[in-house]
């Protein structure tokens, strides 16, 4: 089997944030072959990501066998090294890598979860991420919740977060899992003050309290914070995760498979984290791109709910009674009507080089 084309586009669905600053520019990548099989993957980087696929990554894999995926990954990584390593280039490569994994499953006639040693149809518990407080509907539909808290760093943060956590704990009850996500807004002192206030509420983790590159700050939190620290959605490749894992700077690692380098890198991150006895809960883990790995690789899986703007992905399973089922169809289980992708105003650009 040979790769005959690699195509990329940025679909903008109903309700989609219109630019990559807010949605981090999800792009759809298709890898076509001479056997008539097409693999699909979602990466990131918006128009810049599409450009990287069309002008660099496509040329690297065109005419080659889609196997071994891991070998193609290395070739693509080297092609973008001078401007890549992290960020947009790796987000774009993630889409190609996932498309190759979709092809791998389709060629084998197996869902990717079974290639990874798991079972198609397996049920995975989901936690729901909420931005504006837990609604009664959410409280009755789910058993695990993560609050996005908007409080900026400073002395008022602890009061504000404690109020949000008090409301949420009342809404979800004592038995539900509850997490807090600061999305890189705080510093060490703010995080310690918040943690002290909310620890009595039974908080599973505090997520991304500091910017990703503040490794010295995370080292202090690993020593002093009474609550586990989660993070990693804005880190890239197994090499980027190595210091977090070796230094035990995060207790819960959260790679995003559509950004961190694809499934090829997610598997390496799982292996390194599990060797170190650390937990992996991928960012957006209930979206179909990561779900196969979450189901196959974790004895006690917990998947994060997907984002509402990803409605254009055909085959995404629904969350029901707090859990989600891994597809049984070959590959990743996705399908697209290529002629009806939302917001693709120039179909010729999507089809052509
Ligand atoms: Mg987060």
Image (tube, rainbow, N blue to C red):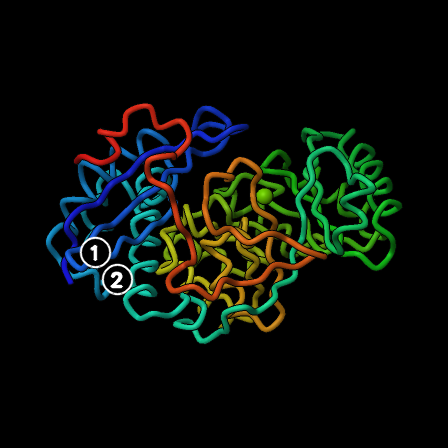
In this rendering, position of residue 296 left or right of residue 129 = left
* Residue, far bottom: 117
Q: Which residue is mark 2?
A: 69
Query: Mark 1 and 2 residues: CB-CB less than 8 Å, in contact?
Result: no
Q: Which residue is mark 1?
A: 36
In this rendering, position of residue 97 left or right of residue 335 = left
Q: x%, y% of residue 212?
A: 50, 43
Q: CA distance from mark 1 to mark 2?
A: 18 Å
Q: x%, y% of residue 276?
A: 52, 70
Q: x%, y% of residue 106?
A: 32, 63
Q: Nearer the viewer, mark 1 or mark 2?
A: 1
> Which is nearer the eye, 198 or 95?
95
Give the crowd class for mark 1: few <14, some 14-19, many >=20 residues within 10 Å.
Answer: few
Q: Is residue 307 above or below residue 202?
A: above
Q: Is residue 246 visible?
A: no
Image quadrant in which you'd find residue 177: bottom right
Quarter holding ligand 1: top right
Q: x%, y% of residue 148?
A: 68, 38
Quarter of the image for the N terminus: give it: bottom left
Tag 1, which secondary structure? loop
Disc marking residue 81 = none
Residue at horizontal 47%, vertical 64%? 293
Residue at horizontal 34%, vertical 58%? 102
In this rendering, position of residue 29 left or right of residue 112 = left
Tag 2, which secondary structure? helix
In this rendering, position of residue 216 left or right of residue 300 = left
Quarter of the image for the C terminus: give it: top left
> Which is nearer the eye, 281 or 193?
281
Residue at horizontal 18%, vertical 40%? 56
Q: Is residue 267 above or below residue 241?
A: below
């Amino acid at each position: 089997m040979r790769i005959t084309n690699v195509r990329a586009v940025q679909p903008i669905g109903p309700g989609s944030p219109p630019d990559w600053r807010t949605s981090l520019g999800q792009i759809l990548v298709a890898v076509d072959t001479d056997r008539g099989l097409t693999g699909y993957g979602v990466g990131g980087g918006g128009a810049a990501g599409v450009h990287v696929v069309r002008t660099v990554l496509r040329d690297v894999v065109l005419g080659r066998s889609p196997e071994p995926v891991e070998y193609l990954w290395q070739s693509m990584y080297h092609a973008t090294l001078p401007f890549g390593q992290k960020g947009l280039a790796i987000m774009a490569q993630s889409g190609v890598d996932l498309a190759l994994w979709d092809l791998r499953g389709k060629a084998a006639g197996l869902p990717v979860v079974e290639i990874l040693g798991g079972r198609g149809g397996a049920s995975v518990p989901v936690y729901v991420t909420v931005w504006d407080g837990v609604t009664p509907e959410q409280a009755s539909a789910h058993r695990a919740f993560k609050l996005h808290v908007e409080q900026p760093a400073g002395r008022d943060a602890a009061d504000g977060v404690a109020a949000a956590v008090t409301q949420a704990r009342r809404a979800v009850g004592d038995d539900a899992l509850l997490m807090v996500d600061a999305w890189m807004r705080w510093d060490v002192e703010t995080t310690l003050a918040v943690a002290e206030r909310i620890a009595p509420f039974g908080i599973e983790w505090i997520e991304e309290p500091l910017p990703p590159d503040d490794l010295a700050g995370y080292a202090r939190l690993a020593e002093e914070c009474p609550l586990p620290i989660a993070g990693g959605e804005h880190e890239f490749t197994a090499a980027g995760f190595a210091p977090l894992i070796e230094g035990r700077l995060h207790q819960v690692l959260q790679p995003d498979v559509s950004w961190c380098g694809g499934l090829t890198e997610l598997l390496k991150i799982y292996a390194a984290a599990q060797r170190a006895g650390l937990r992996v809960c991928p960012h957006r883990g209930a979206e179909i791109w990561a779900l196969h790995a979450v189901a196959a690789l974790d004895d006690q899986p917990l998947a994060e709910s997907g984002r509402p703007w990803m409605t254009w992905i055909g085959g995404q399973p629904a969350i029901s009674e707090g859990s989600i089922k891994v597809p049984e169809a070959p590959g990743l289980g996705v399908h697209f009507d290529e002629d009806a992708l939302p917001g693709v105003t120039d179909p010729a650009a999507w089809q052509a080089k």
